[in-house]
Structures are given as structure tokens and as C-alpha cells.
Image (cartoon, coloured by chain):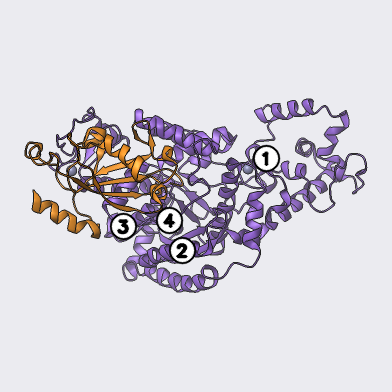
Chain colours: A purple, B orange
Amino acid sequence: MCQVDEEYNVHLENKVTPSVSKKCVKCKENTAVLIIRAGDAFCSCCFKEYFIHKFRAMLGKNRVIFPGEKVLLAVSGGPASSSMLSQVQEGLSRDAPKKLRFVPGIIYVDEGGVSGQSMEERKRAVSQLESVFRATDYPYYIVQLEQVFSLPSSVLDVGSSATKNPQNGSSYKAAVDQFIQTSQNQHPDLSVKNALSQLSSLSMHEAQTGGSSPIPPGQTEALQRLFASVRTLTAKQDLLQTLRHHLILHTARTERYSKVMMGDSCSRLAVKLLSNISLGRGASLAADTGFSDSRYGDVVIVRPMRDYSSKEIAYYNRMFDIASVFIPSLDTKAQDKASIQRLTESFVTKLQTDFPSTVSTIYRTSEKLHTACPPQNTNTQTSDKCLLCTCTLDTKTEFSAFQATLISEQLSQRRGPGANVRQGQCCSAEGHCGSGENGCCPSAKVPGPLDLKSMLCYSCRLTIKDMTAVDTLPQYIVSEAEQRNRRSQMREEISEFLLEEEEDEAQSF
Amino acid sequence: MVPLLCLWLVTLNEKTASLPVPMRNSASDDNINMAAPVALHLEFGGGAELLFDGVKEHHVTLPDQLDPWDMKQLLVWIKENLLKERPELFVQGDTVRPGILVLINDADWELMGELQYELQDKDNIVFISTLHGG
Ligand SMILES: [Zn+2]
Ligand SMILES: [Zn+2]
């Protein structure tokens, strides 16, 4: 990556004057057709080579995908993920040394239920995508967002990380060697082919049961109620992303995929990085924007497109005829100031037009964050993870901005000294909670807003705070919250019998 | 020059991975474009088409004028004649909204002089939105 930069920096030039045909900086023969980064002009041939090389280099450098591993490609139909799909196809069709050796599958989450698309529009989009997916011969899963209402609460558990493949260089190499040997003993790549054919038969089945199955009555309405109860577009976009991740994670687990590839481009990640800071997601910034994200333990998210700008992707798709399907989303036709994410995007793209290195500078920052921070600890208990986004809870640190906000909130509300009781002890005392005066327990079963809050990270609290009613949340979230609540109550009840070091934790509940 | 253009027009609909047309020799153009009508093929993608009633491809002919048409004037013309809603999502100031890519005959408009590019008859101009949600 860096070497490539240095190689081309020599040719930095100002914007060309009209009608002077510029030569490609790489082959120096063909006429350039596009300028990428800070003024490098490429012909289409060299651009293709550069684009393909970058994908393999990204996977090669990070070495997290093992040969024979099942990898689920999250394809939204948008340019970046469609381009990612084409790169995987390209890489798998190569000859021996340069060939990618994992076993891909595709997932598409149909979000038409929240972006106001009619059933016909959704069906049309799905059939367009299906024809793209079928052409790849990979198994694919079409999941409607409505299916969040039938998710099990186990989705929110942190799986035990699959450490059968230790994540270091030498063992990676050993795994590759072993893979090559076993596949040579058979017919070359027979194992992958077998796996692929098994999978594609599976996908036919899946497409019939999961994909084309009608949405249970009332679920689209429930989904619309859920999003209608969210006041701001900012929180809607955040909630949508959370639900989408849960569906992808669930599919990956049930279909035994250990990696999920997301098509975030570097332009996208730069926007995500800045908007996440504004959204109060600073604590999980490295995991949210880095190359790999292991917060879910058993399923690791990787972002192989993070070296490409959206311009490169758009040009590649157009030049080499990569089909992408435009599907309206929540922020389609929205104004710049409609949400924090939208505003950040317009800020970054505006800056990028005047200072072409804006995106790469922000993106480099995320790269540094990723390497400087240890990967999110997958051994921590589920109760230490945010109920919604599964990041490590940042709300338990004593001297965070969050605590400061909390204190000032308490002060400004001017509650009596008893107000703090509301957080924990009140409900834990054998169910007698004087609901008469304070109403601290709105109902015995459904956790009140505060109970839910204590299980959320700072940012997800803000999202939930923007909801008028939390009872519209899908059942799996509510029941997992109840379960965690019971567990923490129990821990509190027995807290005096626990060892000293546990006390600290019990108090913070 | 002319047969080359025709060839390009034929391949246009097939959208093959063909190389873009090399740039024109400006000297020979000077004597033909005077007062001749400029017919263009405009294309909108990546969600930008939503601002044009969802129509991706437009064949338009620009009215005659004394000076040759340039991109800057084309944007004004599009805004006044084609754009159906929310002009601020397509043009900002006198150029396109940041995040919308422009291709002139399949080449980056940054290589073609951007707003100063002088339009030729049968040019193919593409606008692709790279913004999230179009
Ligand atoms: Zn070249
Ligand atoms: Zn969270």
C-alpha cells in the first residue's frame, strides 16, 4: 500500500488543462481515463490491474481468512459490495499461486420494509439481485429485515471465539501449506468444489424456505411501528445498522460461516469514523472501522474494500460492467442536515473535492487506531457487552464523559437523594418496590427504560433515548434484556457472599 | 473521426468494457461546431436518477447558440430543463454536488477540463452519485 503510494507520488501534477490528453502514469503509453488519489492518472488497463491487486494485497496482508474457511459476503446491491463480490469471483477463478481459497456465500438483507418500498418494488429488487447472485454459483441467503421479529435471543450472546486457527503468521502459513497438500492429494481443489456444490444445493433449499417465503402478516407493520417510534433519522440509521448486523450474524452462525465480509469503502469508513465520534461511539471506533472486528467472538467481520475510494469503485463498476442495484435507503433524498451520518458525509465529500487527500487522511487514522488498540476482548462476559451493538461497555469507566453527563443529568433533574435507588436496588428487593410513589418499576416483566439503559453502551443509550416507546423493540432484544436483568439481580442478591473483587462490579449495576 | 463516433454509439448500449474514445483534435472541431445543434446522451446513476423521475438515460439536443456549449452551461440547462426536484441534491454553486462523479465519453471529467470542457455533438455525459442513499 505505502510502496504503491511512493511509486506514484513522483508523478504528482496539477490538474490538467482541457484538450491535452494525458498519459497513464503507470504504462506511460495509453491515454489516461481517470484520476485517482492526488492526481494519478490511469488508463483503464492499468487501473484494472491496480484494483484487482489491491484486493488480494489487502487479504494477503491481514491474513485472517484461512483456506477452506466459509466466508459470508454481505451484499447490499450497492456499488462497493457488488464490487467486492466481483473481486471475490475474480480471486477464486485465478490459477494456483494467486488464487483465493475460501468458500464464499452471499447474504442480502432486504430493508425495503423501513425505507417505504412497496412489496412489488422489493420483489423487483430481490429478483434483480438474485440473478446477479445466481450467476456466481455461490449459495445465497435473502433475509428480510422483518425477520428480526423471529430472531432468538441467543443472537446477542457472544460466541466463543474459534481459536482452532491461532491468529499468527507462522500457523497461517502452515494452514495454507496443509490446505494445498490435502487438495493436491485429492484432485486439485476438489475439496473446495465439493463444498461448493454441497453448499449450492443447500442454497436452493434456503432460497425456497428463507428467501421467497412470504413475510408473516403483521411483521412489516411491526417493523414500521418500531421505526416510527424512533424520533430522529440519526437514531433510525443507527438502529437499522444494529438490526442488520444481528440478522447477518444469525445467518452466519446458523449456516456455519466464521467470517463475514462487508463492503465498506474508505470513503464510507471515513464518514463512519467521524460520525461515530459524534454519535458517542468513540470507545468502539477501532472495531467499527478497522479491517477486522471480532466483537462477536465466533464470527469475525472483515472489511476488504477499505482501501478503495468510492470513486475508484464507481469507475471500476462502470468500466468493467459490474452490476449493482440501486435500492433506496432511509436517507435517500434526505437533506444534508437530516442526520448526523448524512451531515458528516456531506462534510467529508465537500472537503474531499477541495482537498483530495481528506478521505485517505481520515482513513489512515482509523488504520492506526486499529493497530494501536488491542482487539476487543472476546473473553469478557456477555453482561459486560452492550446489549445492542456487542461492543465492550464503555459506561463502567469511572471518569468518562458519560459519567460526567450522568452526574449533570442527575443534578439538573433535582431528584431527591432517593432517586439513585431507581437504578438497581429498588427492584431487586424481592419485588417490593413501592411502585406507588416513584413508579420505579413500570411493570414487573417488561424492563423499564432505565433497566434497558444499564445494559447499553453510551451511544446505544442515545439511540434508545430517541425512541418514544421501547416496547416496539423485537422480542429477542426484550427477552435478552430481561434475562440479563434477572442475572444481575441475582448477582446483587448474593453479592454479600461473593468475593471482594466482585463487589465493584455489582455496585455499578 | 466520424466513423469512430458511430462505432462508439453502437457499443454504447451494450456497455461493453470498451476503452473510452480518445480525445478529439480541437483544431478540426472549430469549423464544424459553430451553430450546429449539440445532441447529447446523458446518463444518471447511483441514485442520481431519482431526481430525474427515475429515468436513467436521456437523449437531449441543446439549442443553438453562438458560443460553443460547455459543461458549466450544460449544468444550468439540466437544472432548468431536466431536473424534477431538489436541485440542491444535484448542483451546488455552479458545479455538481460533491460526491457526484462526472464522466465525459467514459473518461474522468477531471482529465477533460471539468466545467470548461466544450461539448461536442454526440457526447456521452454520465453522472454517478457515490453518496449513501443516492
Ligand atoms: Zn496504463
Ligand atoms: Zn451499544
**Residue A148 at x, y = what percent?**
62, 58
Would you say A167 lies left or right of A281 here?
left
- For marks 1 and 3, the one nearer the N-term is 3
* Label 1 C-beta lies within 8 Å of the nearest ligand 2 atom: yes
Residue A90 marker: 3
Choose between B82 and B134: the one closer to the eye: B82
Rendered view: A327 above or below A207: above
**What's the amino acid at mark 2?**
Val
Reading the image, the residue beneath label 4 is: A77
**What's the amino acid at mark 4?**
Gly
Reading the image, the residue beneath label 1 is: A461
SS type, badge 4: loop
Q: Chain of mark 1?
A: A
Q: Is circle 3 on the same chain as circle 2?
A: yes
**Residue A266 at x, y = what percent?**
41, 40
Front tag of 3 and 2: 2
- Res. A199 in view: yes
Choose between A235 and A262: the one closer to the eye: A235
Choose between A467 and A160: the one closer to the eye: A467
Q: Is circle 1 on the same chain as circle 3?
A: yes
Front tag of 1 and 3: 1
The residues bearing labels 1 and 3 have C-alpha atoms spaced at a distance of: 42 Å
- For marks 2 and 4, the one nearer the N-term is 4
Residue at 32% over, 51% down: A317
- For marks 3 and 4, the one nearer the N-term is 4
Residue A126 marker: 2
Rendered view: B87 above or below A118: above
The residues bearing labels 3 and 4 have C-alpha atoms spaced at a distance of: 18 Å
Front tag of 2 and 1: 2
> Circles 2 and 4: CB distance less than 8 Å?
no
